[in-house]
């Protein structure tokens, strides 16, 4: 279930440059990962699901999963939404910065 949810985020839009497509996909992955984290999925269960997945690309998201679990779990809907938005923005920004001087 988790693997399917995450794998669905690997599809990207076609209008932008390849670099931006990658960053948009990362942003969507970050949103899904933090949503699962905020819903209470344990880190061990998350990592186990990634390891059991036949989609080898999911192994690349382990650092993002670990980063998500460095953020506390929140109780209120507002704080949960903020944690998700902040995390996906941080991951998107890191992606853009990693592109260096390449045109986006």
Image (cartoon, helix red, strand yellow):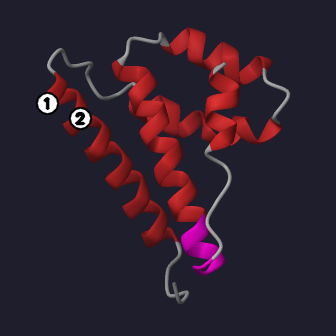
**In the rendered picture of this protein, how many numbered marks are placed on residues?**
2
Q: Which residue is mark 1?
A: 78
| Residue for point 50% across, 48% down | 28
| Residue for point 46% across, 12% down | 41
Horizontal arrangement in the rendering, residue 45 relative to residue 75 (left or right): right
Crowd around label 2: few <14 · some 14–19 · many ≥20 (10 Å)? some
Of residues 46 and 15, the one nearer the viewer is: 15
Q: Is residue 18 magenta?
A: yes
In the displayed structure, would residue 14 be above or below residue 54? below
Q: Are marks 2 and 1 in contact (CB under 8 Å)?
A: yes
In the displayed structure, would residue 30 be above or below residue 71? below
Q: Please tell me whether mark 1 sits on a helix, a strand or a loop.
A: helix
x and y percent of residue 94 in the render? 42, 61
Q: Please tell me whether mark 2 sits on a helix, a strand or a loop.
A: helix
Of residues 90 and 84, the one nearer the viewer is: 84
Mark number displayed over residue 81: 2
Instruction: Specify start and end residues of the magenta stretch as a single range.
Output: 15-21
Q: Quadrant of residue 3?
A: top right
| Residue for point 40% across, 25% down | 69
């Amino acid at each position: 279930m988790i693997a399917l949810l995450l794998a669905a985020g690997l599809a990207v839009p076609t209008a932008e440059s390849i670099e931006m497509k990658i960053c948009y996909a990362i942003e969507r992955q970050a949103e899904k990962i933090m949503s699962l984290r905020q819903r209470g999925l344990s880190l061990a269960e998350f990592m186990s699901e990634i390891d059991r997945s036949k989609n080898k690309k999911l192994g690349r998201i382990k650092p993002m999963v670990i980063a998500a679990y460095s953020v506390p779990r929140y109780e209120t809907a507002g704080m949960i939404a903020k944690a998700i938005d902040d995390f996906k923005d941080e991951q998107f920004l890191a992606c853009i910065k990693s592109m260096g001087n390449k045109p986006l």
